[in-house]
Image: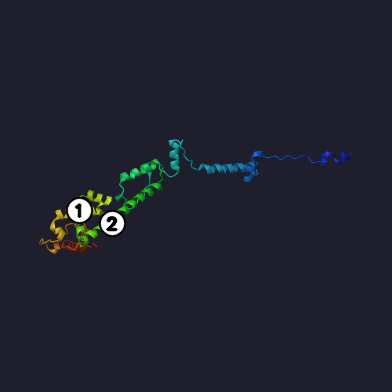
Amino acid sequence: MADEAMGGDSLLSPEPTTTSTWYGESNQTLVESKGWKTPDDALKSYSELEKSYSGRVKMCTPESSAEEIRAFYSKTGCPENPKAYDLNLPEGSELFLDDETIDAVCEAAWANGGSNQAVNATLKSVIETLSTRIQKTREQGEQALKEEFGDKYDENLTIAKRFCETCSDEFNELLEKTGLGNNPIFIKEFMEKGKQTMGDTLIKGSSDSGEKTEGYKPQYPNTPEMYASGEDEESVKARAYFTARGHVY
């Protein structure tokens, strides 16, 4: 009776409690480490994960199709075709690389997924290397000829340059592109040909045509630099002629 008055076991002994969770026991460590309190927390986290993965580039494998590989290249900066590269080549690059060579580089780069930045960097490096090589050849050739010609260096170089002036534009362009115009072997050959074909008036400057000074006109009126260093009469007169017309040596 006393127990009934007190409410019996139902009042003295609490009922067993159970913990209701929205995740399985195997996921407990993950949920606790992520700090998820509700299913909504987990869904939000998954949604953010989906967004982050949507912008990622899937790496190619040996089994990847051509379409998958091209899609990967596109994501890494490769244009849609070789002609679509936006080239920004340094000034004077045409002296070292012609359009056909540039197209070949772009074709190879595109086939291997080269980005616009990579192609520009590669072409710039090639141009700088060729330019440095030509400059080095010029300096070495100049030093070698100065040692060989001695006091006749300026005179012989003027003869060689004037001979080149009589050659075709294509020939001189080739000399410039390849750097052969600075090669001592070529310069000496040009000098000898110049002496054979241009006569003593070019070499010695012994011009006595009876022309008045006022009516004088250099043999090469469009190339004042040809007369920059010679001390013969022709060079002296030519420098005066060009200086009077505003050219600065």
From the image, which quarter does the N terminus lie in?
A: top right
**46 relative position to 191: left or right:** right
* Nearer-the-camera pick, 203 or 86: 203
- Give the CA distance from mark 1 to mark 2: 18 Å
**Location of mark 2 (residue):** 140
Q: In which quadrant of the rendered image does the C terminus lie?
A: bottom left
Report the residue marked by disc 1.
190
- Residue 159 — which label? none
Report helix, strand or loop for mark 2: helix
Q: Secondary structure at mark 1?
A: helix
Disc on the earlier residue, 1 or 2? 2
Depicted 208 relative to depicted 111: above or below:
below
Give coordinates of residue 79: x percent, y percent.
Answer: 40, 43
Image vertical order of residue 228 relative to residue 47, above or below: below
Q: Amino acid at mark 2?
A: Gln
Residue that sits furthest to the left in the current view: 210
How many residues crowd mark 1 within 10 Å: few (<14), some (14–19), many (20+)? many
Identity of the residue drawn at 45% across and 39% down: 71
Q: Position of residue 197 (x, y in %)?
A: 14, 53
Q: Residue at x 44, y 36 (%)?
A: 67
- Badge 2 crowding class, 10 Å Cα cut-off, few under 14, some 14 to 19, many 20 or more, is some
What is the x, y in percent for residue 236? 18, 63
